[in-house]
Image: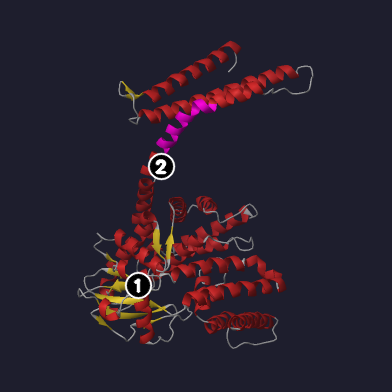
Amino acid sequence: MGTLRRLLQIYWAIGGHIVWWGLVYSHLLRPAISPAQRLCKVLEKLGTTFVKLGQGLSLRQDILPDDYVEALQSLQDHVQAFDSKIARREIEQALGDSIENLFAEFDDTPLAAASIAQVHKAILPDGRKVIIKVRRPDLRNQVTQDIRLLKLVLRVVLALIPQLQKYSLPEIVRENGLTLMKEIDFRQEMRNTHRFREAFKDSSTIHIPAAIPELCTESVMVQEMSGGRLVTDPSVQKDGPQLAINFADAYLHQFFIMGCIHADPHPGNLFIMDNGKICFHDFGMVGLIDITTRRKLAGFFLALINQDSEWLLDSYLDLGLLGEEVDRQQVQRGMNELIQEYASVSLQEWSLATAMLSAARMGWGFNLRMPYHLLLVMRALLIMESTLRSLDPQFNMASYWQSKGATLMTTALKESAGGSSSARLKYEASVFAQELPKALARFLRSSRSRKFEIPLHHRGLRDFENHVDRSSNRIALALVALGLYIASSLLAQSELKPLIAGMPLIALGGYTLALWVTFRLLRGISRSGRV
């Protein structure tokens, strides 16, 4: 009965909003609030799962209008704290011991409370001050049920209103549901925290509080306590310019060296410590960027910095954000307009995030959607730039990217492409050299056992067949020789035994075979009298 009641609650809330929205746009109603604001109220009324889904939906700046993005980003995540007795029980069940044995001191008054968890202060037996993040009771089951029921409701809604299918709502819900399930698993946040702490362990400007692995479970996370002034604190402004540079440097490192970004760097997740370091908190929302995507993003940023619209379009295509059905000329004109727009503004007003968003919205109407990791990149850029300007209103974004950013991008990407790629190339060459004899034997066996005859007879056709055969054979021999030369050269750099005169025997054999194939090829061409 509880499930059915919840299903009806979700159905009537969403269905009612759609009906209301339709009446608004048919001018039968004159609403006191906008559709975007009313949607937020509907999501808040439905509870934690829908608040978090709404916040996730705010990432969809590529398809949502600005008023919806702004409203969804403002969804309130602060709710009433649950009883400290329940918090104690959850901690003891998760960590398998009593509060008294786990902590020297435990503060029953929550430090903060949100829709997923609340935070308590404590002191470990060794004297370290920590915070304890405790997930709300039965939250996982609630989220799982809500996602399942929402998918059922969407099936009905899409059947009744087929026009909504172009927005891929089921896929968006599935994607955000998976992200939410990761966010409520504090073991994932602990791993993210450890990754960032390792990356910045030697930093003189960034601090990441350590998580305590033995005191972290799916529903409870214990982390060293740290704090300081908010980046919006007026007392921070005197050090603002240098802090802005340190903050930007940290994100360049994340983008192009770590390949892992803190996707929610709003002022509430940042502190300026007494020693001047910037302290990052809350690693529940983290974006991963593989090396290929990093290269493509670097191309996009460099194209914008150099105001090259053709390069900008190519970079956009490389990111996979345009399909074959897109009018390329139309997008090219849009890129030119984007370049012209940026050429007319002051350098302090430059925003890579806004440029990326503008480029993404050029795909509207083509049923294209940005991959989730690029949405996180765009979100991180937008919030990062806002935080930078909060620290230093005169921060010159374009100048920074042109100087330090461009250099780091090219250097970091060159270094990251080195070792593993070279090692793999040597491995593949070695495998190729070992498997080549078998492959050639199978090819010769197949050629000998089959008859490649064309069952047609025409005057002159036999000569044409012979010419095609000779040309095909020469191309095949040339490719074989090239492969042997490349494989042998790579193997010559290794130390595979046995060695002859310091060179691996297998490399010498490869060179010998390659020279023999080359000789046969040249002799055949010489006899024919034609290249």
Element type at mark 1: strand
Say left or right for 150 vs 519. Answer: right
Instruction: Assign the magenta stretch its main secondary structure.
Output: helix
**Magenta span contains residue 222:** no
Q: Residue at x 43, y 29 (%)?
A: 487
The kind of residue on which mark 1 rests is Met
| Residue 326 versus residue 247 in the image, above or below | above
Residues under numbered marks 2 and 1 in contact, where contact means CB atoms less than 8 Å apart: no
Query: Which of the pair 454/363 is nearer the observer?
Result: 454
Residue 289 higher or lower than 425, as above or below: below
**What residue span does the magenta drawing correspond to?**
424-439
> Is residue 228 in view from this perspective?
no
Give the labeled residue for mark 1. Answer: 221
**Residue that label 2 marks:** 421
Q: Is residue 435 magenta?
A: yes
Quadrant of the snapshot with the N terminus:
bottom right
Q: Is residue 453 above or below residue 400?
A: above
Q: In screen coordinates, is 51 left or right of 459?
A: left
Residue 448 lies, in percent from the top left, at: 63, 21
Taking 202 as reference, is 334 left or right?
A: right
Q: Residues within 10 Å of mark 1 (few under 14, many from 20)?
A: many
- Residue 404, position as x, y percentages in the image: 33, 55
x%, y% of residue 105? 24, 82
Q: Point out the image quarter for the C terminus.
A: top right
Residue 55 in view, yes or no: yes
User: x, y percentage for residue 265?
Assistant: 38, 69
Residue 151, above or below 4: above
Q: Quadrant of residue 118?
A: bottom left
Residue located farthest toward the left when viewing the structure as drawn: 127
What residue appears at the point 34 percent right and 84 percent down from the top-left corner?
110
